[in-house]
Amino acid sequence: MSKYLSIIIIIIVMSGCTTQTTTKVENFEGSTTVSSFNERKAAKKRVEAAQVYLQKRNLQRAKYHLDKAIEHDDDYPDVYLTLGFYYELANNFPEAKKAYAEALSLDRRNPEFKNTFARFLCRTGEYDRAEELFEEAINTTTFTRVDQAYVNAGVCQRAQGNNQKALEYFRRAINLNPKLPDALIEIAKYEFDQERYLRAKQYIERYREVSRHTPNTLWLALRVESKLGNKDGVASYALQLQNLYPDSAETMEYLDSKEQWQ
């Protein structure tokens, strides 16, 4: 899953994805048990199941549960937010946009919805609207993930070539959360582009203390070590890249130009 698709997965135990409550009613004939079905809770369980399948990249099963969730409660905002993730993973951007917009229309004050929709709009080039939503999310006092919104906003600015503004967002994220992996690696990339390789290495080392390397971060680290003239560092990262992610695009790029890294 793309690193920009940040889904919180809650593992649940499902029992047919049905939610039922029972009430004992006393009357003159004695007591009886009346069952009632809670549509919102049933929809919630379906959404949680869909999120698990999205994490596993099983799009077919995810869509099945999302369709069932809508049957239970077509006004449940989280259904449409998760549906947006589904369509984005399926590369159906028009439908993803509709789903994200519907989620936000059902819960207009939700800063997480704004952050998620803004990230998507940036990905599709709608930068002005994305920036508006990022700022609305960031300025929501009850929002607990402002640090991640700063990172997303920074990535959006970098996509537009606004590197200095992007750096400002990344630094704000670090000020809120010094151990935020995404912010650390984004600053490392910035420092690499500025040819400040020792600084880039320092941020990569901070990243490694709080997160596992990805193909992208290993490739960055390898190039940093090369610029610093550290052949042992290059060899170490190259070995990790090939062993951990043999089929990644970064590994292919390394192998295609392997001679220059010797």
Image (cartoon, rainbow, N blue to C red):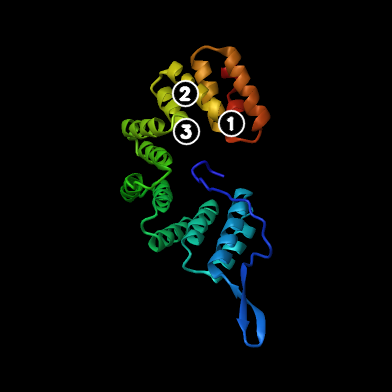
Looking at the rendered structure, the number of numbered marks drawn on it comes to 3
| Residue type, numbered disc 1 | Arg
Image x and y of residue 235, in percent: 62, 18
Q: In 3D space, how far apart are the residues under numbered discs 1 and 2 (Cα atoms)?
A: 14 Å
With respect to residue 25, does 114 lie above or below?
A: above
How many residues crowd mark 2 within 10 Å: few (<14), some (14–19), many (20+)? Answer: many
Q: Are marks 3 and 1 in contact (CB under 8 Å)?
A: no
Residue that badge 2 annotates: 203
In the rendered structure, find residue 180 and report the number of the disc placed on it.
3
Query: Disc 3 versus disc 1: distance between alpha carbons?
Result: 12 Å
Which of the 4 image quarters holds residue 167? top left
**Left or right of 63 on screen, residue 151:** left
Given residues 157 and 8, the one toward you in this image is 8
Q: x, y percentage for residue 157?
A: 35, 38
Amino acid type, residue under disc 3 in the picture: Leu
Mark toward the viewer: 3 or 2: 3
Q: Residue at left 53%, top 66%?
A: 40
Q: CA distance from mark 3 to mark 2?
A: 11 Å
Q: Is residue 54 above or below residue 43?
A: above
Is there a contact, CB below 8 Å, between mark 3 and mark 2?
no
Front label number (3 vs 1): 3
Q: Amino acid at mark 2?
A: Tyr
Q: How many residues crowd around disc 3 within 10 Å: few (fewer than 14), some, or many (20 or more)?
A: many
Residue 7: x, y in percent? Answer: 53, 48
- The answer, for residue 219, to whether it is visible in the render is no
